[in-house]
Amino acid sequence: MDSLQAEGITLSRESGPDELKGEVLTVNFGPHHPSTHGVLRLVVELDGELVVGVKPHIGYLHTGIEKQMEALRYQQAVVVTDRHDYLSPLFNNHAYALAVEKLMGVEVPPRAQALRIIMSELCRISSHLVWLGTSALELGAMSLLMYCFRDRDRVMDLNEEISGFRMHTSYIRPGGVMADATPRFWDLLARFLNDMPGNIDEFENLLTANPIWRARTIGVGRLSAEDALALGATGPMLRGSGVSWDLRRDLPYSGYEKYDFEVPISDQGDCYGRYLIRVAEMRQSLRIIGQAASSIPDGPCNIDDRKMLPPPREELETSMEAVIHHFKLFTEGYSPPPGDVYAAVESPRGESGCYLVSDGTHKPRRAKFRAASFVNLQALEKMALGGMVADLIAIIGTADTVLGDVDR
Amino acid sequence: MGVEALQDMLGDSIITTTLGKLVSWGRANSVWPAQFGLACCAMEMITMAGPRYDVGRFGSEAMRASPRQSDLMIVSGRVSQKMAPVLRQIYDQMPEPKWVISMGACASTGGVFNNYALVQGVDKIVPVDVYVPGCPPRPEDLINGLMILQERIKAQGLRSQL
Amino acid sequence: MKTPRKAVAKGGERDERWIQVAPADLPTVLADLKQQGFASWCFLTCVDHLNTPLLLQPPERFELVYQLRNITSRELIRVRAYIAESEPSAPSVHSVYAPAAWDEREVFDLFGITFSSHPDLRRILLPPDWVGHPLRRDYPVGGEPVEFSDDHQSWQTAPAEA
């Protein structure tokens, strides 16, 4: 201070007419950005480091899936449903399959239901692993990306064993599932169920008590229960604010009522609470898979309705009706009776549903996908205002939006 | 005299090559991709950078966030009409020499989605060097594409890109 | 659930309850349902019944469909409103349900139905200078013509037999 005074410089803390005034800076968080988990564009207004405005601009991944489905037959459209929420393709398939089965008035056999649940919960684990790996990467914990993708590769191995594809299996189809499980699948699944709890412990050891992780996520992105409900949030966004709502437990579908599992809730309402919920959901998914795998009934894994599913190929050599059914199904496809249905499943992001309108022809009149991320993204503004720009990264991560789901 | 004598003195610890081969060897083994994950193929691209498939062996682990620091743009995913100008801008921001791998069916030809919303093939906007088909391609497929690109880079030498 | 007074029709096929209202009554009916506990927003969408082969023709071309959920009583309700082609507009319900803001923008973008008193009605999924409303039935699917597909008559590689 003395040296400054000797040079004739005085430091004054009083505000005067020359006080620096701030200006709100508009920054483009462009569609090409490493931390937006996809092509999301945010126009952020900043007062220094404080976020005073966030406007999401979406549509950079609009694929015209709903229009495409109007041009495809019901059984062809399954492959397109995989690809809108690309981190949880089986849930989209499931919602679509439930909707078509409701329209056709059929119900799949119990073995198919158990297989659907096993593959869906595996998909939930893989989706949460991607979420954890990428969110941790955004906040600096880079090694978690490697650990999570190591375990995700094991889920991909299981997918590959049962269906031949790693991702986008289209495993759950209207009428049942794609194929039955092989003995090697059960073997790999048993080893996965054995190893995975230890791996989840590893992730928790790295993050849950980590002071940096806690400092960056506790208190960040608060969403109260009233706000979450008013903004239509579902899934961990809603359960993270203390509202106990899970479609698997409250409106069970596909046999979920047979299994015993908990639905993790957190009343903290911040990023840390939602992190704890998703990690706990992974453990509960392992529990469900274990119960389903040990109690899976024998029997067919597809419905026995030749008007909906093709006959086995061996029959085509001997039966004329089989040939006619095969021909009709692969040229024209089946036509559900006219009407509209809504079927929803609990995807890793929230309520993912399919609203299907049939006009009696072999192609849907309207297939609307209720995208969990589309509605959850509207809560971003509420969570981010008043926080720092670095917290915005944590909040985008915790919202776990998949832009394919948002833009369809 | 001269080179033979030098070679006798130093033995096998010198190699002779052309500048082109040296430069292209360096370029090929350190291709840095720009992070351009658009959709589902991005998941397989990240898996390629993950522990099992480990693209770090090929020198491509450093996925730069800024296009100005990268050599390769792996267009992984479907390019919608709204995203097309952004893609072109990112491509223009990359310094020469630059290459493009079109990963997946949607980037190569429009894929399953033959409709109004997507650009039917990213080669309508940027010049593509390697097309990797698949929906999504396995990480090994993408590494194969990268290896093909490395052969092309080594063959390019010091010639400027067309 | 108490059916609102303004409901013009109702039904419950396949255990899915629905009511039909006139478009002008939408905000009051939805506010009434929210009061009754249907506070959780599922979705808003539009169905285009152009050239439908149904025996029972819908009264108008466009049908707005709202789906709401009651978390405490675990019920679902669907609200329909038919909009005429000549005057495709409806009142906005974003003041009752906040998430309707984006759904209404999407319906405007893809079907062309304007919502009065919406705070920010502009295109959300397509580029702002897009012409047309793609999900209408008279808008083509688009994309590139593909040989051996359903519409291959409109595009052939070989000339017709001489």
Image (cartoon, coloured by chain):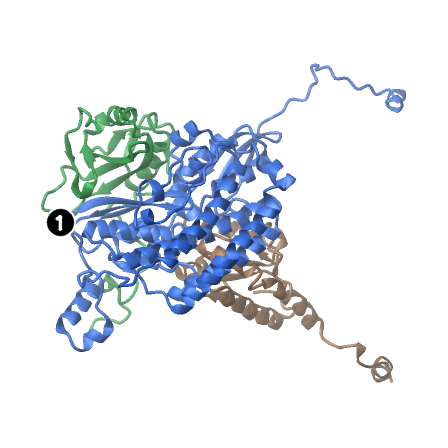
Chain colours: A blue, B brown, C green
Q: Whole-percent x and y of residue A109?
A: 25, 57
The amino acid at mark 1 is Pro
Among the 4 quarters of the image, the one containing residue A167 = bottom left
Does residue A389 appear to the left or right of C141 in the view shown? right
Query: Please, which residue is most extreme toward the left here?
Result: C55
Among the 4 quarters of the image, the one containing residue A352 = top left
Q: Whole-percent x and y of residue A63?
A: 37, 50
Does residue B41 appear to the left or right of A180 in the view shown? right
Comparing A196 with A7, the one in front is: A196
Does residue B21 appear to the left or right of C136 in the view shown? right
Q: Is residue A367 visible?
A: yes
Q: Whole-percent x and y of residue C116?
A: 30, 27
Q: Residues within 10 Å of mark 1 (few under 14, many from 20)?
A: few
Q: Whole-percent x and y of residue A193?
A: 47, 57
What residue is disc 1 on? Answer: C53
Q: Is residue B91 visible?
A: no
Tell me the subunit letter for badge 1: C
Q: What is the count of numbered marks? A: 1
